Structures are given as structure tokens and as C-alpha cells.
Image (spheres, rainbow, N blue to C red):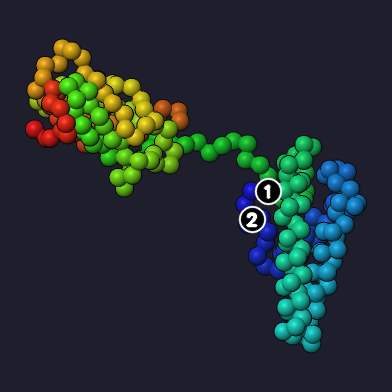
Amino acid sequence: MPSTYLPAREAELLAFAQNLFDHLEANPATYGQTIESIAPFGTAFNAFKAALAVTTNPATKTKPTIADKNAKKQAMIDIIRPLVQTLQNWSGMTDDKRDTLGIPTRDRQPTPIGPPEEMPVLRVAGVFGRLLELEVLDTEGKKRKPDGARGAWLYTHVGDDPPAELTAWQFRGGTTRSNPQVVFEDSVAPGTKVWVTALWVNPTDQPGPACAPQQTRIGYQGLSEAA
């Protein structure tokens, strides 16, 4: 829950606290509280209210009274935050009651996650016969997925040139690992040029853009080299 529900301006903070206290004091059981449970808040609120009134009067606004007001404001805030958390977690709390108390309502409709906007950084780390060892990295070259990405989809193509359309590539499945492997069929002869590309997908399998195709040749051992 964000802490920004507490107003920054002291007059508005006082109004927020006044509203919260008035409703809790009038009907504590309606909000899962008792007179005893809200007593510390009432004490802190009244202390801040009185101290703020002193500093609002130019005749009594001094450095000591301002320091006293600031201390009492912080003491009240330190009670409000856990109190509001308790109210939020109470099983009988509703958004109507939250509106009455002036505390945040719960977002019960999660914000949809759109398709990834980034391309993976794809590397062929090694070629072992027909097995390709790959690295799927973020744009900074680190072994992690960008925010909102569930994993990556891998595609391959056998031939001299990579197809312009992804539909012409062979889908090789999804991966959540940063070092997946792809195994080509026995029908792919040693020395054949092959291509591989990848893209990120979100939790609902919406794809992002595919990265630049990477090439290597099947049948050589050790680190791959562009051909």
C-alpha cells in the first residue's frame, strides 16, 4: 500500500486524521476496532491537533513550538500507518468503508501486462554436433528477463539466408532459462548453415519483437564462429 495516501500539507493531514478518528470513535466495531484499540491514535491525534494550533498562531509560533509540533506529527503518523494496515487487512473491510475512512481502496483489477517491448540479446555460446548452446540475455547483456516477461521463445532456420517473416521459421519452444539448448534433427548435415532468433513473451504469451538472427554451422565442436 502506498504511503502517499497521507497528505503532505499539515492542514490536509489534520483533516484526514480528524475524519479517520471521528468515524473510528463513533463506530469502532464497524471497522473491526474497539474503543481501546483506537485510544493511542486518539491521544496522538489530539496532541498533534493542539500543537498545530499553537504554531498556526503567529504569537506562539517559535522554534520550540514548531519542533514540538513536528515531533507530535511524526508520533501520530507512526500510529496511523500500522492502524491503516490493520484496517486494510480486516476481513470485514470493504471499499465503501475505505472511502468513508479516506484510506486507499484495493485494486482488484490488476493492470494488464502488455507484450514486451525489448528484444533479447541472443548469443550462440557453443556448438556440439547438432546441439547449440545459447545465451538469452537482456539489453544490458545480463542473465535476466525484462520486467513483464515470463520467458523467451526460440526459433531456428536451416539455410543460407534467414527468412524475413517469423512464420517461416521453425518454433523450438519456450524457455525461462538464460542458457537454453536447441538440438537439430539428424537430417541436418554437418557444416550446414543454421540461424537462430528469440523473442520475449509476457505471462499471457503475447510476444515482443524478435532479435537479429544469429548464424552458425552444424557439426563443429567448441565455440561457434560466424560463417
User: Which callout, 1 or 2, points at the residue further toward the start of the chain?
Assistant: 2
Few, some or many residues within 10 Å of mark 1 (<14, 14–19, 20+): some
Task: Please say if 188 is above or below 72.
Answer: above
Q: Is residue 9 above or below residue 67?
A: above
x, y percentage for residue 204? Answer: 45, 28
Task: Name the residue located 72 percent from the left edge and 78 percent from the top edge.
Answer: 67
Where is residue 106? Give x, y as percent.
66, 42
Tell me the residue at 19%/25% (across/down): 128
- Which type of secondary structure does the marked residue at label 1 adopt? loop
Identify the mark at residue 3; answer none if there is no mark.
2
Q: How many marks?
A: 2
Q: Are marks 1 and 2 in contact (CB under 8 Å)?
A: no
Residue drawn at (65%, 65%), measured in percent from left and top? 8
Q: Amino acid at mark 1?
A: Pro
x then y, percent, for residue 34: 89, 48
Work out whether residue 11 or residue 211 is closer to the camera in this orientation and state it. Answer: 211
Q: Residue furthest bottom?
A: 59
Q: Secondary structure at mark 2?
A: helix
| Residue type highlighted by circle 2 | Ser
Circle 1 sits on which residue? Answer: 104
Decide if residue 200 is on the left or right side of residue 182: right
Q: Is residue 207 visible?
A: no
